Amino acid sequence: MTTRARRSILSHFEYLKHSFLPGVYVADPDPLGDDDDEICYFCPIPGVANDIEKGIQGGFLKLTENELIEVFRLSFDTVTNLTQQQISTAEGGCGRAVRVRPRAHFYQSHLG
């Protein structure tokens, strides 16, 4: 895969990350013409061969809403765990509780 193709994939996935709202369809129209009732997102992946089992067809990776939620849950859980470790380290260093205001209400309600 070329560097240009890789950048294109990452660029479009960044768009998906920033526009993703569970339960709200804001993705591109289905370039494959499937008539699924399921909300799906499509990320162009130039130069990658079709692999229907992996959701790759016609130069696009098809991701369902639930698959994207799971991708984001992994990232969200990792960040949450790292933050908790930093809080624990800070509390141990200063000998008192550290107060943290949660800012991730949206993700907590959708990613549980």
Image (cartoon, rainbow, N blue to C red):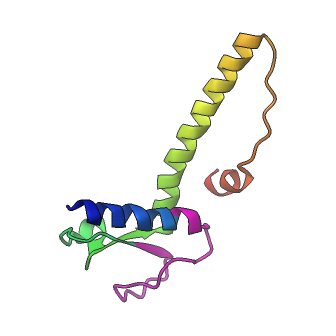
Which residue shows up at 78% across the image and 34% down it? Answer: 100
Residue 45 or residue 39, whichever sits in front: 45
Q: Is residue 41 left or right of residue 46?
A: right
Q: Quadrant of residue 79?
A: top right
Above or below, 112 against 81 in this view is: below
Looking at the picture, how far across and down is residue 90, in whole percent? 70, 19
- Please tell me whether residue 38 belongs to the stretch shown in magenta: yes
Q: Quadrant of residue 36?
A: bottom left
- Magenta highlight: main SS: loop
Which residue shows up at 71% across the image and 11% down it? Answer: 93
Indicate the quadrant containing the N terminus: top left, top right, bottom left or bottom right: bottom left
Residue 24 or residue 79, whichever sits in front: 79
Above or below, 35 against 22 in this view is: below
- Please tell me whether residue 74 belongs to the stretch shown in magenta: no
Looking at the picture, how far across and down is residue 42, in whole percent? 40, 74
Looking at the picture, how far across and down is residue 6, in whole percent? 30, 61
Q: Is residue 3 left or right of residue 43?
A: left
- Magenta extent: 17-42
Q: Is residue 68 left or right of residue 57?
A: right
